[in-house]
Every structure is written in structure tokens, then in C-alpha cells.
Image (cartoon, rainbow, N blue to C red):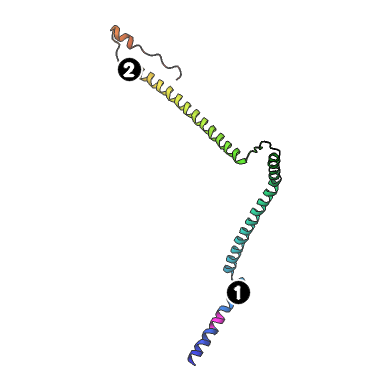
Amino acid sequence: MATHLWQTLLTRSLGEGTEPYLNITWWLSHPLVMVVTVLVLLVTAQGILGLVSKVIKQLLLLIVKSPYLLLQWLLAKSSQSLNLPKMALKEPKLDRKSGKEEKLHERLLISLNQLETTQKEQERVLKELKNMLAENQTQSLPLKPDSSSSSQTQPNPPAADR
């Protein structure tokens, strides 16, 4: 009898406790649960619409490409039946590679030009430094009347590009 009492009490409390959760009005009346539910539904709808969009894009691309592919196939078959050399049609992947190669070549040329400009600038600065050092040495050393030193100590003319 005591087990029967506990069993009825447990089933009644569980039944009354879970009853509101099974009712859809309880889900709609709680704002936090409703917000989470709406967010889940929006994310799911966005995913489904994204998939539909991708499928439509692929179908339209196939529809646009199909006449070209059909013509290519027909030309290949007709050239085989007439024993003509195969027609080589350009593939878009080759164009992309040549575009990448052109960009790489252009970047290399720009880099080489920059290196050349930098080298010229370094040469100009070194020449200017040599002139400055030569002027400094001639000013700090007294001139001797010795004939051998007179040819070596002639001052260099100042640089014109200063």
C-alpha cells in the first residue's frame, strides 16, 4: 500500500510537472525560449536558402555552358569522322595561369627597377662621401712644398650635384 501511494504521487507530480512543457503555448509564452527558437529557425532557414542559391547558380551556369559544351563535343566528333586534326580549344585554367605569370613578371620588373634605383642612389651617396672625405683630408693636412706630395694633395673640385 505504501509503494502504491508513492507510485501514484510520483506519477501525478511528474505528469503535472511535464505537462506544461508539452504544451506549445508554454513555449510561446516564455520570451527567452521564444528568442532562442526564432534564432535557430532563422539560422536553419538561412542555411537552406544558401543551399538553394548554390544549386540555382550551378544549374544556371550549366544551362549557359551547355551550348558551348555541346558545340565543342560536336566539333570534336565531326573532326574525328572527317579525319581532321583535333581543334584545340583554350581552357580558362590556362588563361588564369598566364595571367598569374604576367602579374609575377610585372612584379619582378618593378622589384628590379627599385633595386636599380637604390643601387644608383647608393653610388651617388658613396661618391658624395668620398668627395667629403677628400675635402676634409685636404683641409686638415698642411700643404708641403715637396714635389711628390703636391701632385697627391691637389684638392678635388666640389661635387656639382649637391
Residue 98, horizontal then vertical, whole percent: 58, 36
Q: Residues within 10 Å of mark 1 (few under 14, many from 20)?
A: some
State the separation of the CA atoms marked 1 and 2: 98 Å
User: Vertically, is 96 above or below 155?
Assistant: below
Q: Residue at x 34, y 18 (%)?
A: 136
Instruction: Pick the residue in front: 79 or 115.
Output: 79
- Provide the residue span drawn in magenta: 13-17
* Three-letter residue code for mark 1: Trp
Residue 110, horizontal then vertical, whole percent: 52, 31
Q: Residue at x 68, y 49 (%)?
A: 62
Instruction: Pick the residue in front: 23 or 51.
Output: 51
16 within the magenta span: yes
Please tell me whether mark 1 or mark 2 is closer to you in this view: 1
Residue 152, horizontal then vertical, whole percent: 32, 11
Q: Residues within 10 Å of mark 2 (few under 14, many from 20)?
A: few
Q: Are marks 1 and 2 in contact (CB under 8 Å)?
A: no
User: Vertically, is 42 above or below 3?
Assistant: above
Q: Residue tagged by mark 2?
A: 137
Q: Residue tagged by mark 1?
A: 26
SS at circle 1: helix
Q: Residue at x 51, y 32 (%)?
A: 108
